[in-house]
Image (tube, helix red, strand yellow):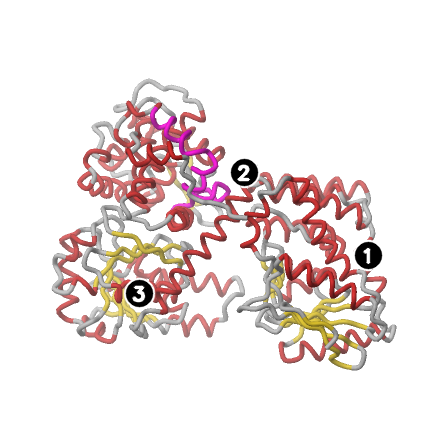
Amino acid sequence: MLYKSDSFEVAFIKDNIAEFKFCVAGSVNTLSQQTLKDCAYALKELAANSDIKGMIFTSDKDHFIIGADIFEFLPTFTKPEAELVTWIKDATDVFDAVEDLPFPTLSAINGLALGGGCEWVLATDYRVASTTAKIGLPEVKLGIMPGFGGTVRLPRIVGADNAMLWITAGSENRAADALKVGAVDAVVSADKLLESSISTLELAIAGKLDWQAKRNVKLQPLKLNRVEQGMSFAMAEGMVMGKTKGHYPAPIMAVRTIKAAANCERAEAMAIENANFAKLARTPEAAAQTGIFLADQYIKGKARKQAKASDVAIKQAAVLGAGIMGGGIAYQSAYKGTPIIMKDIQQDALDLGMTEASKFLGQKVQRGHMTMDKMVATLGKIKPTLNDSDLQSANIVVEAVVENPKVKQAVLAGLEKDMPAGTILTSNTSTIRIDELATALEKPENFCGMHFFNPVPKMPLVEIIRGEKTSEKTINAVVDYALKLGKSPIVVNDCPGFFVNRVLFPYFAGFSKLVVEGANFAKVDKVMENVFGWPMGPAYLLDVVGIDTAYHCTGVMADGFPERMSRAEKDPVSVFANEKRFGQKNKAGFYQYAPDRRGRLKKAQDPQSVELLSSITDAPKEFDKQEIIDRCMVPMINEVLLCLQENIVASPQEADMALIYGIGFPPFRGGAFRYLDQTGLANFVATADKYAHLGAIYQVSEQTRKWAEEGRIFYKVEG
């Protein structure tokens, strides 16, 4: 043994070739601050060992290194900028030490090499990857950029354009794609990885491969002339700003860092990366996006614990009600490996459901992510049927029929009567109370809500709704099934609209009040998209949800919360619903829609919608951007706070992830509670009080006011 620590061990593997094997405690290898300190000591000692003629870096796990230890980030990022520069330089010195070892080095990449793991392999002279490996620099998804030399080494290895594409997208790149651009030197089957790595290193040691020339490229300025630099960086900046609308500072900082260091040798280039990384680390966006990662780990850990407690083996699922939603659920279940029966009373609906599943699978085949044989096999896991008797083998049934309480109650009662005792029943309702539906059942303990979001394959959230009589056994089983579907389940308690729709409809109500007072809905959309950062403004979102669906849900919410959410006398949604302008589904709502060249519906202004709204709106009026944001967001955030106070949602982490995964709350803001921490709860209360005269949705609760007076912080950073 040449060296051993808690995170790695070094020993000769063949002749004078040393193997530096990462073996961090736990299921994956990460680069904690302690691991990096241990590496620094080890590398210094190993560099002085004249017996070593070459070194291979390997992993004892399924993945190489998945990155830095992100749990250390938030407390570290609170340090003053000068301290952060020192901290990050100490880390990058370790990677420089890898690159400066006095013998050839090689990374044998199995599984994932991401973030710091990718930067580690970039510091070595050679990279051999298994066919299943993926490498990438996903730091921008955390609101930061590569900080261990990634902006310096990757452009010099694969070229500036490829490097900027990888870094600004934060993508994971398959081994074959990495080989095409030169990020790895060879791709071999997993069983040949070590053997091929040793062979490559032996060639370098024997002088048959010029490892010093490969290394020298990374130490020098980029090989681009001034004209090429000008074109490359200008194009990259334009593309990044077009995609981010300026909301995400990390990708544009990465581009500008590569640009600033283009004509520098390694030491100066690394100093530029250090300084810019430190600036990014202290931004609100870094705190928000890193916070999302940690909140995601929290909800997944909680879900895994619930699933592990389940004693229900879900080997066969069923969905009752085909069509778009049923087909999406059937596809997701079959694709992730759980056979599913799709039952309906109409053959047309079954055909539509199978068409929907085939469409999603066909897209995977077209993109090369699935073979035709796999597509046929997956479709074979979906059994469309008109016969109730075919449901008997299901362990769990998702009811997804029309959003009508009486219809759902009748269907659920029939299922309970016909299915074997103990079958888990769920309802994919979006607003109807689970306790109301449960009154039709003799054993409500076997029933809960399972609210999917459309389109099912793309939306990560599944809201699992616990009724008053729902058993923990049922909740655990449904969480387990949701995880099997590849979803992020969040358990909430029952109320009209549950959590996501309950907080969404006050947002729509705030928007409607603005329109009635004379605001131009298209301008409101632009502010909420371009300034606040929503993927769709409220008018556009209503069109996508469906005006008829929104109208129905508004009625449910009004019955449930008459003081805050009663249907307004003047209501844009009611106007369009009465005119049967249902949004995208019939190509007319707030906007009109027509297919573009790819067949996707594209919105356009529609004078008729403005004319229809004129019957309920005041004279056109210009509103300040901040007032538009406040009047839309205060009602939503007010309702989010009430949901936490009423225990509808259990924690700020679950609330924020539900908003991000369910309705696209801007990730750079981190969710409603992270947003409140950054703006200050007292400031939120003051803003709400400013608009309290507009109605109950703007009036904060006594608990919220008390929290504000106490200086409540929802996410405490502990160093």
- For the residues labelled 3 and 1, the Cα–Cα distance comes to 55 Å
Q: Which residue is mark 2?
A: 247
Q: Which residue is mark 3?
A: 476
User: In the displayed structure, would residue 549 be above or below residue 30?
Assistant: above
Asked if residue 507 can be seen in this view, the reply is: no
Decide: marks 3, 1 in contact (CB < 8 A)?
Answer: no
Disc 2, SS: loop
User: Where is residue 201 drawn, in percent x and y?
Assistant: 78, 74
User: In the displayed structure, would residue 527 be above or below residue 553?
Assistant: above
Quadrant for residue 591, please give it: top left
User: Where is residue 420 drawn, in percent x and y?
Assistant: 18, 74
* Label located before the other in sequence (3 or 1): 1
User: Where is residue 142 drawn, in percent x and y?
Assistant: 55, 49
Disc 3, SS: helix
Q: Secondary structure of the magenta portion, mostly?
A: helix
**Pick the front one: 294 or 623:** 294
Q: Which residue is mark 1?
A: 217
